[in-house]
Amino acid sequence: MDMTQEIARRRTFAIISHPDAGKTTLTEKFLLYGGAIAQAGVVKGKKNARAATSDWMEIEKQRGISVTSSVMQFQYEGYCINILDTPGHQDFSEDTYRTLMAADSAVMVIDAAKGVEAQTRKLFKVCVMRDIPIFTFINKMDREARDPFELCQEIEKELGIDTYAVNWPIGCGKEFQGVYDRAKGKIIHFSSNGGAKAATATEVDLGDPGLDGLIGPRLHGQLQEDVELLDGASCAFDLDRVRHGKLSPVFFGSALTNFGVEPFLEDFLRMTTAPLPRRAGEETVEATDPAFSAFVFKIQANMNKAHRDRIAFMRVVSGKFEADQEVYHVQGGKALKLSRPQQLMAAEREIISEAYAGDIIGVFDPGIFSIGDTLCAKGKKFRFDPIPTFAPEHFQRIRSMDTMKRKQFLKGVEQIAQEGAIQIFKPPYTGMEEVIVGVVGTLQFDVLAYRLRSEYNVELHTEGLPYCYLRMVGNEEPVKEDELNLGDAKLVEDYKGHQIVLFTSFWSIGWVQERNKDLILLEFGGGKEE
């Protein structure tokens, strides 16, 4: 198979969801269909909803599921599929946002009883910003569920996107019989077979006289009413609108019982595109460009406890990667060979010799890569557009309880900051005895404390700070705190030496600006504060 054919069969997507919507189970079933795992249960599900947050924490602490399943590749019916898993915990980090930057489409898993939840909205905004297709899988139809029309309306209202039901559920809970495939005009009736690879599916025409006997006269009557309503009221299917994130195809099913998973996977693969191009300033880099290029979107340290390793995950944007080829690291300004390139297959890591546009590879990082770095074939020197940085919303002051462990404390904090899980700041003109940490979600504080304890043997003393907004100082010359009227705001530096002002409220930004006419405040990541 030549390079163009290999790229054309690639599909790279992220799965996003609220906690407990069934994302892990759905991922597992995909792997099952692709033959990447022999039985369900390799990807550990949650024991119960109550343990979800602590369960995720345990897993994250052990560098478990949220890492080993962060990137998985499997083959299915001629397609090569890369799944990017996003942590679904209530309180997530920038890592989740960045993962979406490496995907070409997103599958949004929604719990049929709960509908759209807060988490989903945040992630959804990033998809809209990227203009990527969003496919909706309404899961857990094997339990009592809300009215399907109501669920579709909620998606439209909450997320501002039109929906098109590709299939329609027949019953829910114990009465969930299967789905009606609107394109084929057929009912796919499922019967469970105890969690084996596929639920046994029987296809029946909507007008079949034996339908009453199969699903019962009540559900048959309900389905006919629903189908008439759907055909009359819903918007038309338009693949172009799907591919620009304006219309979300909706599927109903149950990942746990396998009902509707395989039809969803097949339709999804048919509707999604091969790897998409990426912008690099004025240039557009096409996936089929023969010259290799990639960007780093995630860095993970200490994945393997026995070796202090650090893995940089990169999305291949164009061409073909070969293990021994020399590539140019644009930000580092030098040529290098990528060491120990690997892919994650379910729970296994394996060394690979080649990868194509659309694939995600992990390479050993001796400490030279940063999030957003570009790698390209020798002779090329473009940079992919930067991955947006999200302003932290929560802050703590931290220091090591044991002053003798200052070195380990600094090393650990800097390492975790380089991964992008936290951002670190210090008051100007001071050493790094204590550090101010900013995070997007408060759970990252717990992860930080755990990792410093387990990986660097450092116990933390922490103190919550009242700040929730920050602005970058845009003045050419450094400003001095004692020459400013900051009220309860605080001047700090990030670890690259940029001056930043932390604020306790949105109102206080205007107050400081009013009293310091020469102070230039910029939105985090650029843009002048009006």
Image (spheres, rainbow, N blue to C red):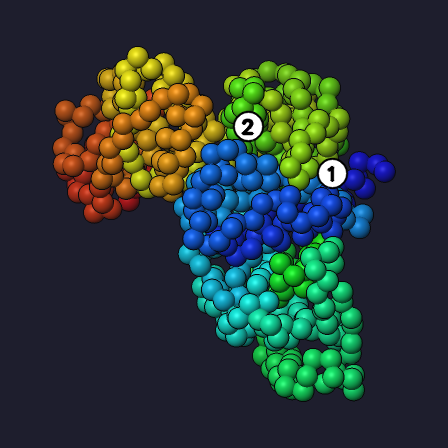
Q: Quadrant of residue 442?
A: top left
Q: Secondary structure at mark 2?
A: loop
Closer-to-camera residue (227/523): 227
Q: Position of residue 398 (x, y in %)?
A: 29, 27
Indicate the amino acid at tag 2.
Met
Q: Which residue, given by chain and number where applicable, does mark 1 sit on?
A: 288
Closer-to-camera residue (7/309): 309
Q: Position of residue 121 (x, y in %)?
A: 45, 56
Crowding at dot 1, Cα within 10 Å, few <14 / some 14-19 / many 20+, comes out as: many
Q: Secondary structure at mark 1?
A: loop
Horizontal arrangement in the rendering, residue 53 relative to residue 321 (left or right):
left
Q: Quadrant of the N terminus?
A: top right
Q: Which residue, given by chain and number where applicable, does mark 2 sit on?
A: 303
Crowding at dot 2, Cα within 10 Å, few <14 / some 14-19 / many 20+, comes out as: some
Closer-to-camera residue (436/513): 436
* Residue 520 visible to an observer of this rendering: no
